[in-house]
Structure formats: structure tokens, C-alpha cells
């Protein structure tokens, strides 16, 4: 399966360094879970401190 880069992806990537909770809401079957799985599986581009 090919992942299409969405406008939301850079914003999600930038939240990884932040320790706050992010809530993702939306209609059914729009890709919320797929997006989160992509975010978790992608190679880390930041260092954890």
C-alpha cells in the first residue's frame, strides 16, 4: 500500500517531541487509524530526551 503525504503529516511529526496529548477526531473511514499507524511505524527523525 502506498501512503499519500497529507497536509496533516508535518503537524503530526512536529508533535512527537511534545509530551502533551493530541486528540485526532473525524468521520468514520477517513484514515485516522492508518495515519497513526504510519506515524508510529515511520523511522524516527528526532532524538528522545
Image (cartoon, grey):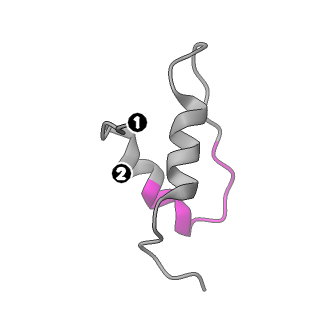
- Could you classify mark 2 by the number of other residues whose Cα lies within 10 Å: few (under 14), some (14-19), or many (20 or more)? few
Relative vertical location of residue 28 with respect to residue 39 in this rendering, above or below? above
Quarter of image, res 2: top left
Which residue is at a point 50% across and 82% down the rendered structure image?
47
Mark 2 vs mark 1: give the one in front: 1
**Of 25 and 28, the residue lying toward us:** 28
What x and y, as percent, mark residue 48? Answer: 58, 81
Q: Relative to residue 14, is residue 9 depicted above or below?
A: above
Specify whether residue 9 is painted magenta: no
Report helix, strand or loop for mark 1: loop
Query: For residue 3, what is the image quadrant?
Result: top left
Residue at image point 45% right, 67% down = 43
User: Looking at the picture, how far across and down is residue 8, in whole percent?
Assistant: 39, 39
Magenta-colored stretch includes residue 19: yes
Secondary element type, mark 2: helix
Residue positioned most to the front: 1
**From what the image shows, is residue 24 above or below residue 37?**
above
In depth, the one of 17 and 38 nearer the eye is: 38
| Magenta segment boundaries in residue numbering | 13-22
**Picture quarter with the N terminus:** top left
Which labelled disc corresponds to residue 30? none
**How much space separates mark 2 and mark 1, taking CA atoms?**
20 Å
Which residue is drawn at the image coordinates 57% and 20% (left, top)? 26
Work out whether residue 42 or residue 45 is closer to the camera in this orientation and state it. 42
> Mark 2 vs mark 1: which is more N-terminal?
1
Circles 2, 1 touching at the beta carbon (< 8 Å): no
Return the x and y of residue 19 as percentages of the image width and height. 66, 65
Quadrant in the picture for the C terminus:
bottom right
In the image, taking residue 44 as reference, residue 48 lies left or right, namely right
Residue 1, disc: 1
Quickly name the residue at label 2.
10
Q: Which residue is drawn at 39% across and 46% down?
A: 9
Amino acid at each position: 500500500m502506498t501512503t499519500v503525504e497529507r497536509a496533516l503529516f508535518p503537524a503530526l511529526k512536529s508533535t512527537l517531541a511534545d509530551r502533551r496529548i493530541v486528540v485526532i477526531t473525524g468521520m468514520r473511514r477517513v484514515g485516522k487509524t492508518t495515519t497513526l499507524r504510519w506515524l508510529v511505524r515511520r523511522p524516527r527523525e528526532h532524538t528522545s530526551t
